[in-house]
Amino acid sequence: MAAVPKRPSQQQELFWKTKTLEQMSAAEWESLCDGCARCCLEKLECEDTGRIYFTHIGCKMLDAEACGCKDYANRSKKVPDCVRLTPANVRTLSWLPSSCAYRLVAEGRDLYWWHPLVSGDPDTVHEAGVSVRGRVEGLEGEVSDAELEDHIVSWPTLLPKRAKLKKRPA
């Protein structure tokens, strides 16, 4: 996950509505990240069904308060299994949250009111209750692999009611 996205210029303001993921510049692509950090939570896959289960344990590189990577530029070197999102894989990664902007744009849907590109405020993702802030119970390495099953949670796959609203609550 990138640093907090900067609001694009007036000219580029609605690029996610007019461009495909493949047509976006690197800056536009990075700005699509809403900063929720749900993708930075440890996940378990059931060997029998392939179903993905989220935990409330973050990647060792996750800054759980800022909801960002501690070393985004070098994340792949420090965490070899970190999944780098691309226009191709966002269409196939079943574990991406339904609220993920990459997924929404790939599906031809608009961004939610709380997305920083829409609100102009990087804190609205937290205000809407979408981010992992305050919900991470530990980081990778602090919990053994054997104990991860004890940390399975459902909230990363759900969207809070206030996040589903059409506009920012008053």
Image: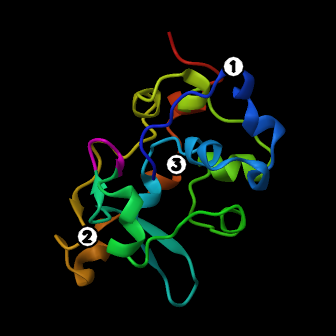
Task: Specify which label sits upstream in the sequence, 2 or 3.
Answer: 2
Q: Give neighbour class at mark 3: few <14, some 14-19, many 20+ (Cα, 10 Å).
A: few
Pick whichever, 75 or 129, lies toward us: 75
- Residue furthest to the top in view is 170
Is disc 3 placed on a helix, strand or loop?
loop
Q: Which residues are magenta?
A: 64-68
Is residue 158 visible from the viewing direction of this image? yes
Pick whichever, 126 or 63, lies toward us: 63
Point out which mark residue 140 bears. 2
Query: Which x, y percent locates residue 68?
Result: 36, 49
What predominant SS class does the magenta segment belong to? Answer: loop
Q: Nearer the viewer, mark 2 or mark 1?
A: 1
Whether the residues at callouts 2 and 3 have beta carbons within 8 Å, the answer is no
Q: Please name the residue that numbered disc 3 is placed on.
A: 158
Q: Amino acid at mark 1?
A: Gln
Q: Give the vertical position of 32 relative to 41 (above or below).
A: above
Q: Give neighbour class at mark 1: few <14, some 14-19, many 20+ (Cα, 10 Å).
A: few
Query: Which x, y percent locates residue 163?
Result: 54, 32
Q: Amino acid at mark 3?
A: Leu
Q: Nearer the viewer, mark 2 or mark 3?
A: 2
Q: Please name the residue that numbered disc 1 is placed on.
A: 10
